[in-house]
Amino acid sequence: MLEAPADYRFNLLAMTSSDAKRLFKQQIIERDNGQCRYCGCTKNLTLDHIRPKSKGGRYEASNLVAACRRCNQSKGSNDVFDWFLAQPFFNQDLLQSFT
Ligand SMILES: [Zn+2]
């Protein structure tokens, strides 16, 4: 998969910016097996910045995971480690996949 929405846009010239963004989101969700990377649920999936945008995290595949709306909102701009440690679905192996 490509790294950022703009890569899709320039890869396929006919694609609009919003189509590129939609395809990009779909690819991240497919990469994450159609599940929230945090709690594993499959509903209301969004893209979450592992390193928050407010802390300089980029909108790139390596910094994005599929996350359900609930996890995304709950995590907010907290550090992923601090937030994930406090969750009932905390899992050490999963935590390591975020680094
Ligand atoms: Zn979730």
Image (cartoon, rainbow, N blue to C red):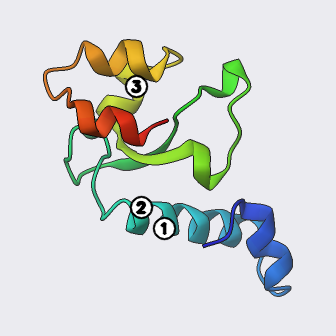
* Disc 1/disc 2 C-alpha distance (Å): 5 Å
Q: In the image, ligand 1 is in what quadrant?
A: top left
Residue bearing mark 2:
29
Name the kind of residue labelled 3 in the image: Gln
The picture places residue 90, in percent across and down from the top left corner, at 20, 26
Is residue 65 or residue 71 the one in the foreground? 65
Q: Residue at x 37, y 43 (%)?
A: 67
* Disc 3/disc 2 C-alpha distance (Å): 17 Å
Name the kind of residue labelled 1 in the image: Gln
In the rendered structure, are the residues bearing label 1 and label 3 in contact, judged by CB atoms less than 8 Å apart? no
The picture places residue 15, in percent across and down from the top left corner, at 77, 81
- Does residue 87 lie above or below 18 as drawn? above
Q: Nearer the viewer, mark 3 or mark 2?
A: 2
Local secondary structure at mark 3? helix
Is residue 41 or residue 1 the one in the foreground? 1
Is residue 95 or residue 66 the one in the foreground? 95
Residue bearing mark 1:
26
What mark, if any, has residue 46 been given in the picture?
Answer: none
Q: Residue at x 67, y 50 (%)?
A: 60
Q: Residue furthest left?
A: 88
The picture places residue 55, in percent across and down from the top left corner, at 69, 19
Name the kind of residue labelled 2 in the image: Ile
Badge 2 residue CB within 8 Å of ligand 1: no
Q: Residue at x 67, y 28 (%)?
A: 53
In the rendered structure, are the residues bearing label 1 and label 2 in contact, judged by CB atoms less than 8 Å apart? yes
Q: Quadrant of the N terminus?
A: bottom right
- Does residue 15 lie above or below 64 as drawn? below
The picture places residue 89, in percent across and down from the top left corner, at 15, 29
What mark, if any, has residue 73 been given in the picture?
Answer: 3
Mark 2 Cα shell of 10 Å, populated few (<14), some (14-19), many (≥20): many
Q: Which numbered disc, 1 or 3, marks the residue that appears first in the sequence? A: 1
Q: Residue at x 60, y 26 (%)?
A: 52
